[in-house]
Amino acid sequence: MKKKICSNVLVIMLILAALFTSGCGPEVRLGAIMLRDAIKGDSPFFEDSGSKWKTIKLEQNDGKILQLDLPFALNDNGEFESDDIVQNAEWHRYKNDSIFVSVDHCRLADSKKEVTFNLKTFTADFGGREKMHPKLKKIEKRTINGKEMTYAEIQAEDNGARTIECVGIHSGRESWTIIYAYRSDDKAMHKLVEKSIASISLG
């Protein structure tokens, strides 16, 4: 117990030293808070805090369930207006200073058509996307948990370099797009996204 207390005190001292020597910029403050929370076991952003992860379950019109693991709830939910092309469209989102996650679902009115997953589709949730100068770096088919999906990586600018990782799923007349956007130099968020994408399933 004494060793654990001493270890925590040493880490806190190192954090304080970093704050004073760096001028206490916003990125350093955020890093210090996240590290402090990791020590307490409260941070959802590290692999060690596995108990904070939860399985998000979203149902599509035919009763199939989309599942993905995240260390937070998708707490911003709403519906898009239906028209003669898209019906029952909805979104589920989460945003903080480190990451933006959006899960969109829709059902097409015409059973002979399907959503085309491309740069335009995957950046539809971003207002003023032209100013972000998005560039499609990679798009490919991936099989995740037995289901073929479309994976894309997009690079963009928004107060610094941003990585947007995307997954598109067709399911009959229904489709899903899952978007993760984070700073390109944020290795912790990259690991979080890799773990979440690997958990995606539909059935």
Image: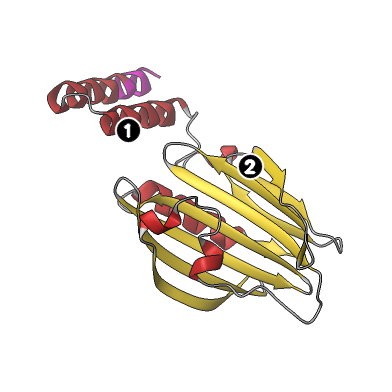
What's the magenta bit mostly, secondary-structure-wise? helix
Vertical comparison of 42 with 203: above or below: above
Q: Badge 1, how many Cα within 10 Å: few under 14, some, many 20+?
A: few
Residue 171, image quadrant:
bottom right
Left or right: 123 with respect to 170?
Answer: left
Judged left or right of residue 46, residue 31 is: left
Residue 31: assigned label: 1
Residue 90: x and y in percent read 72, 52
Q: Is residue 203 visible?
A: no
Q: Which residue is painted at 39% across and 47% down in the image?
A: 188
Q: Residue at coordinates 59% horizontally, 58% vertically from top-left?
A: 178
The tag on residue 74 is 2
Q: Which residues are magenta?
A: 1-8
Mark 1: amino acid: Gly
Quarter in which the C terminus is drawn: bottom right
Q: Secondary structure at mark 1?
A: helix
Please say if 38 is above or below 12: below
Residue furthest to the right: 62
Query: In which quadrant will I find the N terminus?
Result: top left
* Residue 103 placement (x, y as % from top left): 63, 53
